[in-house]
Amino acid sequence: MTKWIRWSGLIGFTVLIAILAIFWMFAAAPIIKFSIEKFGSDAVGAKIDVAEVNLGFNPLVLSISGVEVADKSAPMSNLVSFENAVADLSLFPLLLGKSIIQDMSLEGVEFGSIRKISGALEGNDEDINPEVVESSAANQTSVSNNKADSVQDKSSGPSSEAIPSADEILAREPLVTITRGEKFKLSLAEHKKELNESIALVPNTSAMKEYQNNLDLVMAGKLKSVEDFKARKKALDKIKVQFKIDQKAIKRAQAAIKSAKKDLGSQWPLLKKAPGEDYKNIKGKYTLDANGTSNLTALLFGDDAGGYAKTGLKYYEKLSPLLASDEEAELVQAQQDKRLTGSFIHFPTDRPLPDFWLKNLSFSAKLPLGEVAVVVKDITHQQDVINKATTLKADGRNMHNLKALTLNGVLDHRNGQGKDTFDLNIQQWQLQGLNLGLAGLELNQSNLNVQADVIFKGSDMNAHGQGQFSKAEFSSKDRTVLAKEMVAALTHIDTFVVSGKAQGELASPNLSIQSDLDNKLSRAFNKRLKQKQSELEKQLKQKLADKLLSYSGDYEDQLRELNATEGGLGDTSKAMGKMAKAEVSSYEDQLKADAKAKADKKKAKLKDKLENKFKKLF
Amino acid sequence: MLGMLANLFKVLNSDASPGQVALGFAFALFIGLTPFLSLHNFIVLFLVFIIRVNLSAFFLGCALFSLVAFGIDPLSISLGQTLLNLPELQDFWVGLYQSDFWRATKFNHTLLLGSLTISSILFIPLFLILTLLINVYRDRFMKWFETLKISKLIKASKFYKLYEKLGA
């Protein structure tokens, strides 16, 4: 029998095993560190840094310190980080390549802490959200400060602009009154210029008097000689030339007036209508009726509710893929391999052995609200093997302004689709100085009880939440009409319920927030609004009328003036025509009269002569 | 390939007993056909090291059966799946599944169970057949074979010389 035994082989085998064991003892910790950083980073899509890994053998304890998991979308901040983690490992499964951790406790857990160096993986730049990077890089303070900043940002946001005053509305809206008014103003200026230029050429009263004097001079006395006649004719011709020039100027001025009257006359009715049109538009846009107030809840609480949900969803989206079973991926990989790998078939057991199983994870996280103790059980990517869902329980401890906070979650990925449920319960949350982001409104104080639940099924989500506010007190620093009216309306409301829903695709769920505050506000607000709306309408009308006046000015006076000028020009024109005609006819009359007088004289002479001759005959 | 052939003839023509050579090949079935990183292979290696089996035959067999495995893996997986899902055996598997040791053997892996079953079934027949064949070869064909041109060609090859030099 002993001839079949190879003693050298036995020694060699023992030595080989010993070498492997010693190598494992020394190399295990660095290999674990490398594995966490390499494969963890691949899974999360951002850097995972581990400061140190220690492996104790009796008992088998893994200690990991200085872990920072970078945020893929904001590489200058951490998704989560912790100072120290101690895990009790099971030795036998570890020898089989199974990481079964009985208990793991984390210390110094922080969410969203700032990193010193970027946590982006090379070639992953396209996933980075530049806004988040900017904000996280700029903000080197704590999470609580972030919250404060966001509140501050919100307060400096659209509060005073949400529903503006009449002046603000008029300043903000594209008014046809302004458009038409500007056009009218421009036309008026052009016509005025043309009128001034043309009227400047028209002879005025003194010029007309001078004309008359000159004419009188030319016409005074009798023509003494042909030279006198010629001299007077020359002077008359000169006056005639000037007459023609002046008449042209009068005609130009008359044409300018006609054109101005026609152009401005056509623009004027439209300009007059403009304030009415503007008022109609503005009224339609800024309806402050009950329908308008139904959106107030979303305006008041939408940002906060959306913000919390967004943060929650962000963490859920990061964690959910890690819990999904990778059996399908294994199958695909198996098909791709040249040599088939087969698959495991699992049987019912009290002691299941998945590849990774963290049975009990406990840590406490410091949040702005206080300390939250979290216990997560049965973390594994092979829930079908252990036939258990991952459960989460978070309890608030030493919370500020909050009596109780509990969050329970069940992440069940035993079936292909997966179903994750969470329910949140907050009791007696004493809200103080909560900026509501609308019209400078602030919830001075209120007690809030929150009950919310959310179900994620595959890529769909269905979330319901209800917040019961009591002992609510509101105020506003804004001096806008809306702010004052809101505060006046809210004074009588101290309890209300806000409920929200988010349903549909996880990436873009349909969100809705409703509240009995809408109805309460509607009633209180409608009454005030009707009153205030008529005031606002009146103000708007007045302001629009003022605007119209600023464009038209004393258009109607000017129109009267134009008409008067036109009439005056007509008179001047007539007078000049008369003067010209009178002068010509007088001169001819004089010539005719002279000729007639001469003829009459000659005639009388001839008559006398004839009478004398006849007398001599008879 | 030529090296493997040279090694085969070297083993066949060596002084090693036919049983040791055949056992080396038979143990190689497990290493070649089943997934390497398994507990049973650790045991097989332990046995190969302490039992005087021909190591050349063992390593040659590992290489040969690893190539064969590519062809019979689908059959192994199918067999493993069938066995693991066989209703009559469910209690047996469930019983084994409760034990850490048996779990460590990865018996519930379709490829491993199938290939291990095939290896186990073939182990003894292969040992016996190979022992018989090696004896027959050595008695009747070895001298005749050494006179063949191909044998001389192999012996003249640098691989053969290398193997001889290394004393494989």
Image: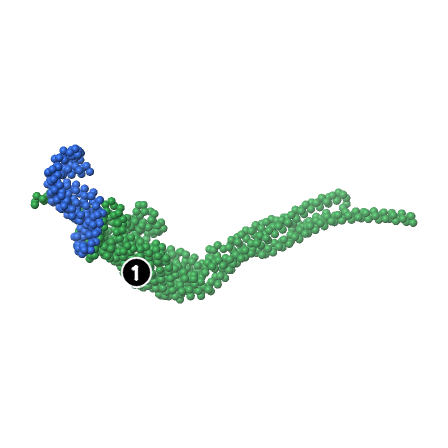
Say left or right for A377 vs A445: left
Say left or right for A41 vs A220: left
Estimate how packed mark 1 is, as few (under 14), some (14 to 19) or many (20 or more) residues with alpha carbons within 10 Å.
some
Front residue of this view, candidates A426 and A40: A40
- From the viewer's perspective, is residue A132 above or below residue A399? above
Residue A9 seen = no
Rendered location of residue A388, percent (x, y): 24, 57
Disc 1 marks which residue? A423
Quick one: which residue is furthest to the right in this view?
Answer: A618
For the N terminus of chain A, the quadrant is top left
Q: Quadrant of residue A552?
A: bottom right
Looking at the rendered structure, the kind of residue marked 1 is: Asp
Instruction: Count the marks.
Output: 1
Q: Quadrant of residue A286?
A: bottom left
Rendered location of residue A88, percent (x, y): 20, 54
Q: Colour of chain B?
A: blue
Front residue of this view, candidates A388 and B68: B68
The subunit letter for the residue under badge 1 reads A
Q: Residue, x 69% and y 45% (percent of image)?
A: A238
The green-tinted chain is A
Rendered location of residue B158, percent (x, y): 18, 34
Q: Residue, x 51% and y 53% (percent of image)?
A: A179
